């Protein structure tokens, strides 16, 4: 069976293999000679030198368009020349100076892919990162020269190109993290979490590893807050923040993670109390007692537990212990499950606390099947009707 090689391993092999070959000759400026190869020149270099100097003269004269075309022509005609890498970098650099950032990005990307040992490699990566960041911050794409809407997808693709072409550069971990941000802003929560997880897996010692772990928890927290209180997303948020606190005790985000954990636990208890009150109002005292007891167990000593204890005592006095004692637990029916989810949605909508953190992305129209599900329609969280049909026993 043939196994594919992971991208990072393949890139490492390429780097190690390249290290066995001599470094490419640098292109330098010499007074009276123009641009030339710093080292042994080939016959192809001699031909490329003339075209490179013509392009450089056009650039100096301010004829940027002509210079770009000549640099491109050199790369096409003399790809093995020592001038090819320098000319390719010039293509990206001149496009960037003109403000054509997407063409500049493509020019730099071609350098990374075709001339990975170029002396300008790191400079090209830095420029690509800056361009991608502009799109992440709201740069508008251009179609036929006219600006269109800002594109998070374009930012995502740019950062992905950086990680693929320069997986060991100092911008790789940052780019991987920003892939997650771009996906979040597109409403793709599950894919964003996966992108953040790759930061910890591939770059565990980077400066953004703790930010990525925190962002995993925050992404799940937003899912738990949107529309209904999604128990699965809430548990994943708790797990992620707990893991964050254990792995990064010195992080400046630790206090916020701890506050998020308190928020998640508080919302869980608040939900149980409100559901207990609902069943209490419907005179389903056995169901009400179950949720009042849940508050007593999970929030002992709190104001909510005092309310729950007082009402439990009143119910016992009204109907007796036997009437509210739980017998063997029955499997949850589909109807009861739907009711429970509607109650949780109602509680979440009525009691949603303000949250201080990064701005939330727009609510997506669809959520990937692999991720936690959340409600997206306003009709899913309308108040319950005055009278509910009896629940099946």
Image (tube, rainbow, N blue to C red):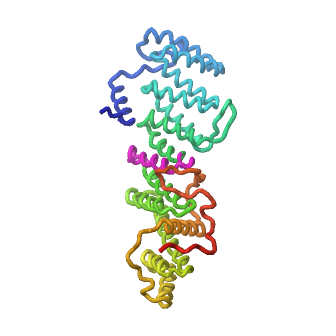
Q: Is residue 208 visible?
A: no
Q: Nearer the viewer, residue 18 or 144?
A: 144
Residue 368 position within the rendered picture, expressed as x and y whole percent measured from the top left: 50, 49
Question: Would you say 367 lies left or right of 166 here?
Answer: right
- Residue 185 drawn in magenta: yes
Among all residues in the image, which is located at the extreme right? Answer: 146
Q: Which residues are magenta?
A: 183-207
Residue displayed at 44% across by 34% down: 166
Q: Quadrant of residue 139?
A: top right
Q: Nearer the viewer, residue 43 or 363?
A: 363
Q: Nearer the viewer, residue 88 or 58?
A: 88
Which SS does the magenta portion mostly show? Answer: helix
Residue displayed at 59% across by 32% down: 102
Residue 171 position within the rendered picture, expressed as x and y whole percent measured from the top left: 47, 39
- Residue 306 drawn in magenta: no
Which part of the image, by quadrant, shows the N terminus?
Answer: top left
Residue 337, above or below 214? below
């Amino acid at each position: 069976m043939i196994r594919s090689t992971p991208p990072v391993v393949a890139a490492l092999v390429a780097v190690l293999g390249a290290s066995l070959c001599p470094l490419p000759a640098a292109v330098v400026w010499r007074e009276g000679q123009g641009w030339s190869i710093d080292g042994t020149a080939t016959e192809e270099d001699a031909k490329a030198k003339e075209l490179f100097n013509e392009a450089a003269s056009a650039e100096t004269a301010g004829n940027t368009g002509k210079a770009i075309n000549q640099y491109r022509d050199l790369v096409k005609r003399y790809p093995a020349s020592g001038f090819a890498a320098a000319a390719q970098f010039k293509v990206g650099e001149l496009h960037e100076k003109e403000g054509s950032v997407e063409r500049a990005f493509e020019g730099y990307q071609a350098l990374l892919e075709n001339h990975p040992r170029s002396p300008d490699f790191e400079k090209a990566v830095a420029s690509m990162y800056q361009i991608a960041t502009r799109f992440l911050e709201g740069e508008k794409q251009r179609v036929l020269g006219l600006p269109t809407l800002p594109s998070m997808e374009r930012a995502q693709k740019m950062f992905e190109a950086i990680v693929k072409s320069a997986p060991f550069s100092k911008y790789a971990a940052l780019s991987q993290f920003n892939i997650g941000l771009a996906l979040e802003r597109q409403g793709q929560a599950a894919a964003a979490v996966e992108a953040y997880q790759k930061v910890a897996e591939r770059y565990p010692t980077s400066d953004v590893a703790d930010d990525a772990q925190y962002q995993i928890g925050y992404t799940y927290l937003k899912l738990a807050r949107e529309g209904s209180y999604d128990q699965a997303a809430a548990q994943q948020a708790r797990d992620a923040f707990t893991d964050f606190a254990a792995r990064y005790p010195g992080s400046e985000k630790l206090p916020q993670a701890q506050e998020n954990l308190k928020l998640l636990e508080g919302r869980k208890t608040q939900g149980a109390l409100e559901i207990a009150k609902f069943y209490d109002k419907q005179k389903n005292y056995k169901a009400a007692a179950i949720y009042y007891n849940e508050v007593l167990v999970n929030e002992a000593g709190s104001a909510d537990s005092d309310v729950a204890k007082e009402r439990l005592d009143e119910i016992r006095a009204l109907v007796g212990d036997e009437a509210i004692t739980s017998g063997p637990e029955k499997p949850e029916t589909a109807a009861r499950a739907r009711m429970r989810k509607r109650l949780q949605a109602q509680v979440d909508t009525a009691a949603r606390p303000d949250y201080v953190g990064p701005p939330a992305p727009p609510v997506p129209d669809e959520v990937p099947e692999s991720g936690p599900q959340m409600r997206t329609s306003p009709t899913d969280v309308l108040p319950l009707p005055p009278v509910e049909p009896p629940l099946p026993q």
